[in-house]
Amino acid sequence: MPTAVVLDGHSLTLDDVVAVAVQRAPVELAPAARARMEQANAIVAALVESGAVAYGVTTGFGKLSEIAIPRDRLGELQVNLVPRATRPVSAQQISQQLRRQLLSFPNYNVFVNLPSSLNIGARVGNSSYNVTVRSPNTDDLYSEAGRLSAAMKDITEIQDVSSDLEVRSPKVSLVIDRDKAAAVGLNATQITSVLSTGFGPKWSSTIYGESAQYRVLIELDP
């Protein structure tokens, strides 16, 4: 078996790349490199928790740089494969290889999802197939959805079972007195727009300097 290639961020050579790609040499991460990755991860995590706007972290790339990424999708990573004719394995086989490797990292929940050629509906989840549970009773929904998710995880034919049910997330119900709002010249749409602008990221304009551009984000002052 070929000698393992140790990634330390400094000493990778072309011979190492050939050994991994052709000779199927195993790959290991040096302890010092892992420590640097954990330190960098802590910085990014703190940035996300603070709600700050950071290019490529809380926004898209390139033309999508002014598009804020929803908080529940910040951990997604898109991988584009080379054409099927130029690789020996299928996308499904690659996803299984990635799944085994990614699941070896502690304290992480990783879901490898192969996008379908045709998507019907606007809902996007962590897996290729989604099950939607509905109930007019919120307490029953919280209880039964958790039981269903736990039961599905016990089925060996199903993998990457997850739930986007946010039981512990704070929730505020706002009731608009339309008569009083109308008395001051406001309607429900205007109030909703202001709240959305204040509590959600919204780019208002771009300031152009001599050598740089500055995007203006509207937020409420806490």
Image: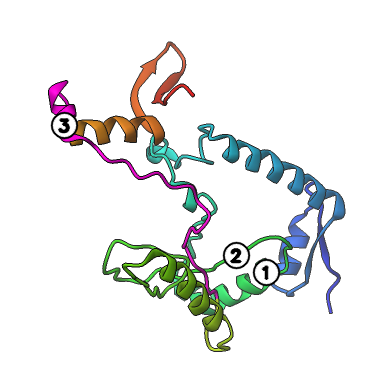
In primary-sequence order, the first of circles 3 and 1 is 1
Q: Position of residue 46 (x, y in %)?
A: 65, 38
Q: Which residue is mark 2?
A: 110
Label disc, if present, on residue 103 of the rendered structure: 1
Looking at the image, which is closer to me, 34 or 25?
34
**What residue is drawn where x is 29% and y is 29%?**
194
Between marks 3 and 2, how big is the CA–CA gap? 43 Å
Secondary structure mainly formed by the magenta segment: loop
Looking at the image, which is closer to me, 122 or 37?
122
Identify residue type, mark 3.
Answer: Asn
Quadrant in which residue 2 is drawn: bottom right
**What residue is drawn where x is 61% and y is 72%?**
99
Part of the protein shown in magenta: 160-187
Q: Position of residue 80 (x, y in %)?
A: 48, 61
Quadrant in which residue 179 is drawn: top left
Q: Position of residue 27 (x, y in %)?
A: 77, 66
Q: Element at badge 3? A: loop
Q: Quadrant of the N terminus?
A: bottom right
Q: Would you say 48 lies left or right of 15 here? A: left
Between marks 3 and 1, how big is the CA–CA gap? 50 Å
- Would you call the spot at circle 1 few (<14 residues within 10 Å), some (14-19), or many (20 or more)? few
Q: Which residue is mark 3?
A: 187
Q: Would you say 75 lies left or right of 16 here? A: left
The furthest residue to the top = 210
Task: In the rendered view, tell whether residue 109 sits above or below residue 178.
Answer: below
- Residue 49 visible to an observer of this rendering: yes
Please identify, in this view, whether the residue under mark 3 or under mark 2 is nearer the observer. Answer: 3
**What residue is drawn where x is 53% and y is 35%?**
51
Q: Position of residue 130 (x, y in %)?
A: 39, 73
Identify residue type, mark 1.
Answer: Leu
